[in-house]
Image: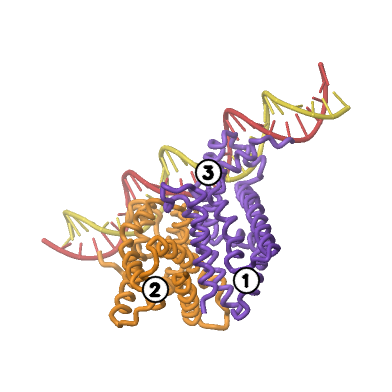
Chain colours: A purple, B orange, C yellow, D red
Amino acid sequence: MISQPFSTKDRILSAAEDLFAKSGFAGASLRQVTATANVNLAAVNYHFGSKENLINELFKRRLDDLTAQRVKALEQVQRNGAVTLETILDAFVSPALTLAQDRGGGQSFVRLLARAFAEQDQKLRRFVSDNYGHVLKEFAKAFLQLLPHLAKEDLYWRLDFISGALTYTMSDFGMIKKPTAISEEQHRKNAAAQFVRFAAAGLRAP
Amino acid sequence: MISQPFSTKDRILSAAEDLFAKSGFAGASLRQVTATANVNLAAVNYHFGSKENLINELFKRRLDDLTAQRVKALEQVQRNGAVTLETILDAFVSPALTLAQDRGGGQSFVRLLARAFAEQDQKLRRFVSDNYGHVLKEFAKAFLQLLPHLAKEDLYWRLDFISGALTYTMSDFGMIKKPTAISEEQHRKNAAAQFVRFAAAGLRAP
DNA sequence: GTAGCATTCAAACACTTGTTTCATACGATT
DNA sequence: AATCGTATGAAACAAGTGTTTGAATGCTAC
C-alpha cells in the first residue's frame, strides 16, 4: 500500500475539504466529492468507513499540523528570549493565517473550521479540546506570566474573544479584503500585524 | 386572516429557527420542522413558497429587530452626551447579547447567524450588507470621531475583529461559560462589560 | 343557507442521500 | 504462472429530500 503523490485517499480528502467548506457537511454529497476527486463513489466508504469518519480525518490532518506549528513558534519565541505579548500572539496567529492562505486546501480548511465551530458540533468541540487543548493552556500560561495582575477569569474571556476574532478573520481571509495591489504575503503579514496589535491592546486592557 | 398569537406561520418560524441552528440549513429537513411545529408538511411551501425563502424570512425578522435596537441605543448615547468608546461599543454589543440570551428563539438565532457567516453564503452576506450596512457605517463614523488620529484602514480591520469576536461570543453564549451560581442577566452584563473593555482597548491600540 | 376564499391535510411525485453488494481488475509474493 | 489481498467499478438498496397535487375543511360575507 504505497502512498502515491495523489492517491485515491488524498484526492478524496482534498475534494472533500473543498466541497465541505463550500457547501457544508450536510450540503455536500459524497457523489459530489467523488466526482470532483475522479474516484468511484464506493471509495469513500472503502477508505474511510463513513462520511462522518472522513470528516474526522480531515480535521485531524490539518489540526495536527497547525498545532505543531504553533508549538514550534511558541518554543522559538521562548528560547530566543524576546517574550512579549506581541511575539506570543504572533506565534499563535501567524501559523493560522499562513494556513488560511495556503492554496493546497488550507484555505478551504479554515472556513471549514469556522463552520464547524458555528455548528456547535459538540463532538467536534470535544475532539478539539481533548486533542489540542493543552496547547491553548500553554499559551494561556505564557500570557499570564506577562500579565501577572490580570485575573484568570478576565484572561479567559479575552482569549475567547481573540479566538473568535481570529476564526472569523481567517474565514474571510483573502476573499474580500485584500487590495489587488499588494501581494498575498504582504497581505497576510499586514493582517497578522493588525491582529496582533489589536489583540495585544485588548489583553492589556485595564 | 387574523394573526393568532401562535399562528401556523409563527410556529413554523420558531421551529425552523431552532432546528436550523441545531443542524444547519441543509441538515434540518422540512419534515423535522413541520413535525416540531405540529403543522402539516405542505404548510411551509404554502406560507413561505420554499425552504430558501423561509430562511430569508427568518433572518429578516430578527435582524430588523436587532439593528433597530442598536440604532436606538446609539442615538440615546449620542443624545445623552456621554459619548465614549465604551458607551458606543455597549450600544453595539448589548442588543446582540440580549438577543443571544433571549429564550424566545433569539438564542438559536445568533448561532444561526454565526453559521450563516461561516458558510460564506454570498447571497446572505449581500443581504445583510445591503439592508443593515448603513448601521455599521453609522457606528464607524461615531468611532472615528473619537479616534481622529486612527487611519480608516486600521479602524476597519479592528471593527472586523470586533464583529468576529462578537459573533463567536454570541454563539457560545449561555451554553458553556455561564457559572451556575449567577443569574442570566448578571452573566450577560458581565460578558458585555468584559467585551466592551477588551474591544475599547483594542480600538485604542497605538 | 350558500358561495367564495384561505387554510389544512394525506398522498404522491421525482429525485437525492449514504451505504452495501458483488463482480472485476490490479500487483506483489510464492 | 498461479495466488492472494488490495483496490476499483457499476449497480442496486432503503431511506429521506423538497415540492406539488387535489380533496377536505373551516370561516366570513352575502
Binning the other alpha carbons within 10 Å of mark 3 as few (below 14), some (14 to 19) or many (20 upward) gives some
In the image, B182 versus B44, the foreground residue is: B182
Residue on which disc 2 sits:
B95
Kind of residue at disc 2: Pro
Residue A98, above or below A75: above
How much space separates mark 2 and mark 1, taking CA atoms? Answer: 31 Å
Chain bearing tag 1 is A
How much space separates mark 1 and mark 3, taking CA atoms? Answer: 43 Å
Residue on which disc 1 sits:
A143
Chain bearing tag 2 is B
| Position of residue B107 measured from the top left corner of the image (x, y, whole percent) | 46, 69
Residue on which disc 3 sits:
A29
SS under mark 2: helix
In the image, B134 versus A31, the foreground residue is: B134
Please report contact status of discs 1 and 3: CB closer than 8 Å, yes or no.
no
Left or right of B174, for residue B157: left
SS under mark 3: loop
Please report contact status of discs 2 and 1: CB closer than 8 Å, yes or no.
no
User: Is disc 3 on the same chain as disc 1?
Assistant: yes
Q: Mark 1, mark 3: which one is toward the viewer?
A: 1
SS under mark 1: helix
